Each structure stands twice: as structure tokens, then as C-alpha cells.
Amino acid sequence: MLSFLARGKNRKLVLQQLDDARTPTELSKKINMQRSVVSRAILELEKKGLAECLTPKEKMGRFYRITNVGKKLLQMLNSRKKA
């Protein structure tokens, strides 16, 4: 799963910004990326268990955040770069 994250620069960038709960719209503005690209990345991260939706019953304005597994993978990826 580490390679899944390392291969996708958009996925990695989105996951790094999910330390606080955010909507796809907030994320897209913060990292200057199209909302559709952010939403796609979030769905891919969610399927792998790296991000979770905090408001799944909402039709619009869903909030997402990084999971503990996602945090560990980011730490592993960052420590590999330093080594």
C-alpha cells in the first residue's frame, strides 16, 4: 500500500491535508487543485482505508479526515525520503 501512495502525487497531497476534517471543496481551494481531482483521490484513499468520511449521510459538504493507517503510511513515506 505504500507504493499506492507514493505513485499518486495527488493522493499523497490530498492525504497530507486531511489532518483536519475538510470537505473536498475546502481541500481543492487549499491545495489549488480541481475539486473533481480531489474527490477522486479521496475516493481512492477511502477504498484503501487511508481516509474516512465523517458525515456519510450528507449529500453535499461531506467531511473527510485521515485514518490512523493513513497517518502511519505517510510517516513511513516521509521517513524513507529522509533516509
Image (cartoon, rainbow, N blue to C red):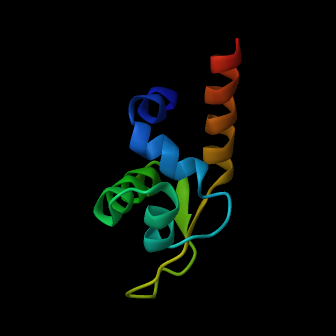
Q: Position of residue 33 (x, y in %)?
A: 38, 56
Image position, residue 32 (x, y; %):
43, 57
Residue 77 placed where, x, y %? 61, 28
Residue 3 picture quarter: top left
Does the rendering let one see residue 59? Answer: yes
**Position of the C terminus by quadrant:** top right
- Residue 49 visible (yes or no): no
What residue lies at 50% left-to-right and 41% top-to-bottom? 12
Q: Is residue 43 above or below residue 12?
A: below
Residue 27 shown left or right of residue 44 in the figure: right
Q: Residue placed farthest to the top in the image? A: 83
Q: Is residue 42 above or below residue 25?
A: above
The picture places residue 22, in percent across and down from the top left corner, at: 57, 70
Residue at image location 43% in from the left, 72% down from the top: 25
Determine which quarter of the picture holds residue 40: bottom left
Residue closest to the eye, 53 or 11: 11
